[in-house]
Image (tube, helix red, strand yellow):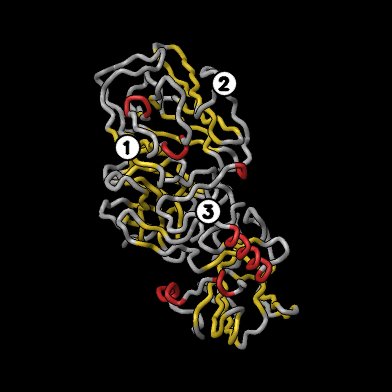
Amino acid sequence: MPSYRSQLTRAFRLAAFIVCVVNIVTGATSVPGAKVDSGRARAKFVAVKAATTPVDAAASVFKWNVNEKGLPLLALPNSHLKAGLDQSLSYPLDQFSFPVFQALTYDDERARYLLPSLSKESKGVHFIEFLPGESKNTYTSTDGANIKLIDNDNMKVVRTSDGTKYIFVRYPDGEFRCATIKDAGGASLNLLYTANGLLLHGVVDSAGRTLTFNYSSAGIKSLTQTWMANSEGLTRTWMVGEQPELAANIEVKYSHAVVSAFTKALPSNATVRQYTTAMADADKTLARIFGGPNAVAGANGFEPAGLAATYPFYRGDIIGDDGIRRRGHLTYAMHLYGSTDGTGDSPLYVPAGFTQHSGPPSPTDAAVTFYYPRLGNLTDVTLAVFHVSDFQITPEGDRVRIGSIGGPGGSSASYKHSHIEFYRGNTGLPPLAERPSHRIDPSTIFGK
């Protein structure tokens, strides 16, 4: 599933979070300098609160204000904001809510798009799944909400039944992030990113009101808003998290945070909760067997931690909000990258000892298969390597070079990888639907 990657620590941890869905109604605001019009209604919003902390709706909720131009775009409490703003800030999307720091992803194995969302019914993570529709380049959600996705190559448009549009644009790292939200009434939000697309820097609406996210190496340190009230320009900064050393009125300038400094969070519905030392050792072994000196492997259900921070660290099995267990892309499969950040090149190897192999990479999967009477700890194994470029068969001691990583079918121009699976028996390349049932856990093949 290519495209589950890069931006800050936006993979939201919902094991420790609950969703509070609130309809924003008329009422006063505590923002200094703001004129209140009690006759205006504001937009709905979703706030995600730590389950270990009592929910105080009056003091901690976020309010999107898309109608009253004399108020800031986001109504916030007087006191500082709790940590985890990037995990909690969401915008309504039909019966779901879209966390604005999340990216639209594509699963090329199943030819579907997936959009992370928060479910109002189950109060848990929900992936809106889009499958191809009858019209060309059109996808339809599978949950009955009739949400459409229009695929215009480097731009994807998600449209709800009420006419609201969410426009996703491809950024330099290959990720599709939301650039604009336009509701049916004409109000619009533009989401602004840093030049490399890794960080959401701010939001500006059609009236010129702005939100600016100010970063430090620990994440979002403060949020600054500007707006007009009574013909006067107003600016205010809210601190994020417990920061007693900084006064609440001190503005923190934007800094180019080092993305690798941020810790990736596990989704609450992950069936495996920890990336252990044993898993890390197994991945290092796999990288030495299949890649060059700088290669990095991701198996055991986890991607390499060095990929940009919103590329999901965990890609193993998950339990959906419907209670159904779903196999992950790296459940009994592995990715091989040429460098820790996923953009490097690497020669691609397989162990010696195979007795037969397929021809050049297949046109649809760029895949080559190898049959081993014995491979590592097991007998009767087929090895399938996807995304092979520069195909060759060149023995090099106890390994055979078969080409380079990142052939046709690779995930994006920014990331170069090969996908590797192991099947029980002399299967060749099984049909797509049958592959999961044949897979063998790669960590068991070469372990002690």
User: Can you tell which mark lies on residue 313?
Assistant: 3
Q: Is residue 413 visible?
A: no
Task: Tell me how many marks there are.
Answer: 3
Dot 3: few (<14), some (14–19), or many (≥20) neighbours within 10 Å? many
Q: CA distance from mark 1 to mark 3?
A: 26 Å
Q: First in sequence: mark 1 or mark 2?
A: 1
Dot 1: few (<14), some (14–19), or many (≥20) neighbours within 10 Å? some
Q: Of the residues shown, which amino acid type is indicated by label 1?
A: Cys
Q: Nearer the viewer, residue 105 or 447?
A: 447
Query: In the rendered image, which quarter is residue 188 located in?
Result: top left
Q: Nearer the viewer, residue 270 or 62?
A: 270
Residue 46 point in image, percent of width and height: 34, 37
Q: Residue 102 vs residue 126: left or right?
A: right
Q: Measuring 61% from the left and 73% from the top, which residue is drawn there?
A: 446
Q: Of the residues shown, which amino acid type is indicated by label 2?
A: Leu
Q: First in sequence: mark 1 or mark 3?
A: 1
Q: Secondary structure at mark 2?
A: loop
Q: Measuring 55% from the left and 72% from the top, which residue is drawn there?
A: 444
The residue singled out by tag 2 in the image is 246
Q: First in sequence: mark 3 or mark 2?
A: 2
Q: Nearer the viewer, residue 110 or 150?
A: 110
Q: Residue 447 vs residue 30: left or right?
A: right
The residue singled out by tag 1 in the image is 20
Check the image and report above or below for 89 versus 41. Answer: below
User: Can you tell which mark lies on residue 81?
Assistant: none
Quadrant the C terminus occupies: bottom right
Residue 111 point in image, percent of width and height: 42, 64
